[in-house]
Image (cartoon, rainbow, N blue to C red):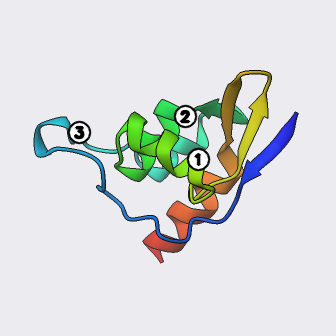
Amino acid sequence: MSEVSTNGAGWEPDAGRSQSDQEKPPTLPEVRQWPASVAVSKAAAAFGISRSHAYELIASGRFPATVIRLGNRYRVVKASIIRLLADDAA
């Protein structure tokens, strides 16, 4: 297991998503109910970006939350998502 990214520099909400792809992101209380780590696609939804854009950000080290690589899979740490969403809400 290795940590991939916690940076987030250069990240923009809604970047990489067409208007038709944009769904209402989950609320902070909904995110708090998630397991300790989630799939990249679920984390991407929380930030309002597409899955493919999330993977681009991970590859470049600019994904806004903490990403853990497990073999050939990535997981995003829920606590890091909550910190970012809570900062946006404040």
Q: Earlier in the sequence, mark 1 or mark 2?
A: 2
Q: Earlier in the sequence, mark 1 or mark 3?
A: 3
Left/right placement of residue 37 relative to residue 86 reads right
Location of residue 25 in the rendering, given as x and y in whole percent from the top left corner:
34, 45
> Which residue is pictured at 25% across the width and 45% down the height?
17
Q: Callout 2, which amino acid?
A: Val
Numbered circle sitting on residue 70: none
Furthest residue toward bottom: 90
Q: CA distance from mark 1 to mark 3?
A: 21 Å
Q: Is residue 5 above or below residue 38?
A: below
* Residue under numbered circle 1: 58
Q: Choose mark 1 or mark 3, whichever is in front.
A: 1
- In terms of image quadrants, where is residue 20? top left
Q: Are marks 1 and 3 in contact (CB under 8 Å)?
A: no
Q: Callout 1, which amino acid?
A: Ile
> Which residue is pictured at 40% across the width and 44% down the height?
53
Location of residue 46 in the rendering, given as x and y in whole percent from the top left corner:
44, 46
Q: CA distance from mark 1 to mark 2?
A: 9 Å
* Residue under numbered circle 3: 23
Location of residue 1 in the rendering, given as x and y in whole percent from the top left corner:
88, 33
Question: Quick one: SS at disc 2?
Answer: helix
